[in-house]
Image (cartoon, rainbow, N blue to C red):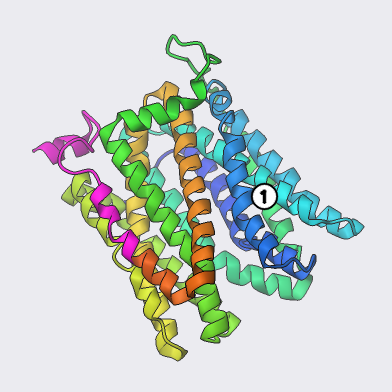
Amino acid sequence: MGRRRLGRRFGWLWAAYAVSAYGSGLGFGALPLIAVLVLRAGPAEVSALSAVGPAVGALVAVPLAPWVEFRRKRPVMVAMDLVRFVAMASIPVGYALGCLGFVQLLVVSVVVAAAKIAFGAAGGAYLKALVRPDDLLVANARFESTNWSSIAVGPPLGGAAIGLFGPVTTVVADALGYLLSALGIAAIGGREAAPRPSGKEPVRAGAVLDGWRHILGDPGLRALYLNNMLVAGLIMATEPVLAVLLLRQLHFAPWQYGLAFAAPCLGGLVGSRLARRVVDRYGRDRVFRTVGTLRAVWLIGLAFVRPGVVGLVTVIAVELAIIVNMSLFNPVLATYRLERTPEHLVARTLSAWSIGQQASIALCTALGGLLAAATGPRATLVVAGLLILATPVLLPRGEGTAAPGTPTARRTSA
């Protein structure tokens, strides 16, 4: 298969996303790290920063959804990038002035989380208008591959940069990534049509809930929404627990811990590049059922990690299997979600999706921490691994997951 050309404007959008993603990759985990190294924060404060900040940010994003829906999407994306730039840039400024505090980190966490959701909603709506329907899967796969490559490369480089230049170095890189992303989106050019509310008042009461109404009213989207919330929540809830197991109980070296999570992310390049071919060959229904199930079966393997090289290889193998399947599944899901959503509901639907996922991650992470404190890391990993095995039951079955009139729909029904 030759490389699909999606046009100059998509190239600018992809470049802007890549700059932002690599900046965030360099700054991955920077706020908790600054809380520990600079502010001497304890476990309770670090947990609050990791869970409460994004959860409150999700709540803040709820009323933003209609505001995003009924405005041109590029200016919204630029504004959300600039908001994140200012928020992140306030940290090195506070550090330099000697007035950086925990409350500031918490506020930054909330602002960045809310702006991320609003940006994603505007970006999805803009992408749907920018590329042809047949090219949506290719475009989403390129974003997916960029995301995983940034996670593979960014954190190790960020850790080295912190060691050489100080604790706020990666925050500066993250802030500059948002600024450059804003400039790239502004450079796309072209006139964007004003959004049309489809005959409804854009500020009517209850407009903030229209995204959830659409998701829950569509059988395919509803099944995938519930499945995605549980899978994302359970997988992310294991990360802090696994960190305690590897670093404290099994005495992994920091470089081994970093390698265990960075190396498998390269599998994201494999899965995302296969997405279009796999859908073309097997159909979307089978991808949802098979790959969606394969995302869930590996997590329990983390409960059986042992010390030394064998344990390191086990973590890498389990994470690699999960990421390959996730990176194949995610662009197919993102494309399906856009195809099933009317233009006047895209931003609110994507906001509702992100808010639900973020809330699920925060809740599962908090419950996982409580369970680990009461029973230990291994028991928590076993519980998470067993619970996630039940999530394939929520995947859509049979017909209904292909958008009417698309090549995938015709292939699936043939």
Identify the secondary structure beneath mark 1.
helix
Magenta span includes 400? yes
The boundaries of the magenta stretch are 386-414
Q: Which residue is mark 1?
A: 109
Tell me, yes or no, whether the highlighted magenta stretch contains residue 293. no
In depth, the one of 150 and 336 nearer the eye is 336
Q: Is residue 328 above or below residue 17?
A: below
Task: Classify residue 313 as left or right of residue 224.
Answer: right
Residue at screen point 39% across, 64% down:
384
Return the x and y of residue 331 as percentages of the image width and height. 36, 48
Residue occupying the far right of the picture = 97
Q: Is residue 156 left or right of residue 123?
A: right
Left or right of 150 in this view: 228:
left
Amino acid type, mark 1: Ser
Residue positioned 53% across, 64% down in the render:
370
Residue 259 image position (x, y, % from top left): 51, 77
Q: Position of residue 16 (x, y in %)?
A: 58, 45
**69 or 18: nearer the eye?**
69
Residue 213 x, y percent position in the rendering = 39, 27
